[in-house]
Amino acid sequence: MESTAIYTVSSRLKVSAPLPRNSIRRFFMLLERDCGLAKELFHTSIGRSCQRTRSHMPFCSHSPYGSVSLDKSSVRLLAVSSSFSIDSISVNGSGFCSCQPEQKDNEVTTFCSTSIYSSALNEDVVQAPSHVTEEKIGVLLLNLGGPETLDDVQPFLYNLFADPRPLAKLISMLRAPKSKEGYASIGGGSPLRKITDEQANALKSALEAKRKKVNVYVGMRYWYPFTEEAVHQIKRDKVTRLVILPLYPQFSISTTGSSLRVLQKMFREDAYLSSLPVAIIRSWYQREGYVKTMADLIEEELQSFPNPDEVMIFFSAHGVPLSYVEEAGDPYRDQMEDCIFLIMRELKSRGINNDHTLAYQSRVGPVQWLKPYTDEVLVELGQKGVKSLLAVPVSFVSEHIETLEEIDMEYKELALESGIKNWGRVPALNCTDSFITDLADAVTEALPSAAALSTSTRPSEEADHDPVVSFIKFFFGSIVAFFLLLSPKMISAFRSNLL
C-alpha cells in the first residue's frame, strides 16, 4: 500500500489557542488560500465532496492539508486527515473525510469528501454523525416494489411509468386490466414485499451473528415502503454509518441507478444526510457466495430430470431497452454475460457440462430491447429438438410476478407447445442461507469504506438532464401509449374508466 502523507492546517498556521473573531476571520482567509474551502465554510456547516467510482468518474483531487481544531470558545473544525494518495486515503476518526480504494470483487463504490463543521458559528445546524456518540449502523435494501392487492395495481403502474409523467396516467390505466389478470393468477398480489422483509430480518440476524449490531431498512422504488420513507426512518434513528445494498445482482441504470438517483437527491438536500458516511454496493453478481449459491440451486434442480446431462440450462434475465446499453452506457448486459460465465465455470468445476443459453424477458412496447428474447428462444430450442429445459431466473432474488406468472405460466406453456417435454425452474434465492450469509459478508466488507455521499452530479444524473435523453424517453413513452391505444381491449378498458 502506498504511504500516505498527512498534513494538518494547524501545523502550518500554528493555531494553538483561542482566537478572537477577527483572528478567526483571518484564519479562514489563510485556510482559503491553502485549501480553497473556507470562503463558503465560514458561515455554516458544509461538506464539499467529489465522487469517485471505478469506471465513470475521474480521480478526485484533494488539498494536502486536512484538519484543524480550535478551542471551543472559537470554532471547532472536524475535517481530519486528507491525503496526497489517490489510491489509499483512510477513513478518519470523525467519519467525515475519506477515500477508500474500491473493492473490485464486489464493486463497492465509495465517495471522497473534504468536510468542515462549524458548531460554534451555528448552533442550530444538525450535527453530522460522529464516533464520539454511539455508533449506529444501518443497511438499506433497495428493490423495485410491487402491488400487494389488485387495487394497488394501477397506482403501482402509474409510479412505474411516471417518466414521462404526462403519459403515466394513460399507460397505467391501459395496462392495469392485463396486469391485474397476472397478479390474480398468483394469488391477488405480489409477494415481493413480504419476501424482502424476510430477507431484511434474515440479514439482520446474520450480521448480529458476526457481532454487528445493525438496523436493516427496506426501500422500494415504486411502491410501499418507498425509498424516501426508509431514508426518513434512517434519519430519525440517527444512523451513523450506512451501507446501501440494492437487491439487484447486476447494475442497471433502470434499477439500481434509478434508486441511487433518488437517494442522491435526498442526501444532497439534507445537512445531516450529506455528512452521513455511506458505502454503496453497486453490484455483487461476481461474489463467490452468490455464484456458488446459484450453482447449488441449479445442480439440485438438475437432479429432478430423468437425464440431467441432457438438460439445457436456460438463463432468463429481465431485459432493458437496447438504447440504455448502446447510448447511455448501461453496464447491465456486460455484467449479465459475465455473471453467466462465472456460474457456468463453477458448475463445470463440479463436473456439470450442460449446454446453456441466455435470453431476456419482460420487454414492453415496440422499441428494441436486449436480445435474444426469451419467448423467441424457447420456440427455437423446441424446433432444434431440445426436450429438457431448466429455466434459471438469473436477475431476480425474490419470487414475484415475473417468475411466478411470466416464467412459470406463460413461458412454460410456450415451451411445452414448442416441443419441449421436460420443464423445470430454479427457485429464486429468497432467504437461502448461503445467499443471506454472503450478503452479510458484503455488508461487513463495505463498512470500512463508508464516506460522506458526494453532492456532485453523477453521470446518471447528467443523463437525466440531457435533452437528447429526455427526448428519447418521451418518444419511447409516446410510442408505447400509441400502440396500447390501438388495442381494442385497451380502448374498452379506457372507456370503462371514463364512464
Image (spheres, rainbow, N blue to C red):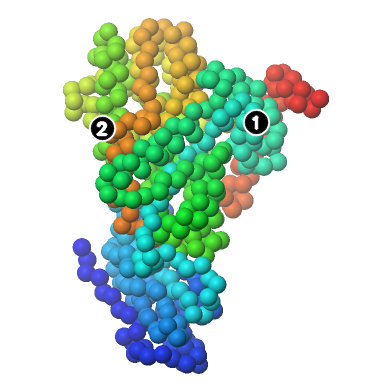
Question: Would residue 164 appear left or right of 239 to someone viewing this image?
Answer: right
Pinpoint residue 194: horizontal percent, then vertical percent: 47, 32
Mark 1 or mark 2, whichever is nearer to me: 1
Question: Would residue 106 appear left or right of 267 to someone viewing this image?
Answer: left
Q: Is residue 274 above or below residue 406?
A: below
Residue 373 makes an appearance in the image: no
> In the rendering, which numbered label is found on residue 292?
2
> In the rendering, which numbered label is found on residue 53?
none
> In the rendering, which numbered label is found on residue 154?
1
Question: Would residue 114 appear left or right of 100 to someone viewing this image?
Answer: right
Q: Quadrant of residue 385?
A: top left
Of residues 346 and 215, the one nearer the viewer is: 215
Residue at horizontal 37%, vertical 62%?
134
- Counting residues from the start of the chain, the first of labels 1 and 2 encountered is 1
Which image quarter holds the N terminus?
A: bottom left
Residue at horizontal 51%, vertical 48%?
230
Pinpoint residue 332: horizontal percent, then vertical percent: 42, 39
Residue at horizontal 38%, vertical 30%?
430
Residue at horizontal 50%, vertical 90%?
21
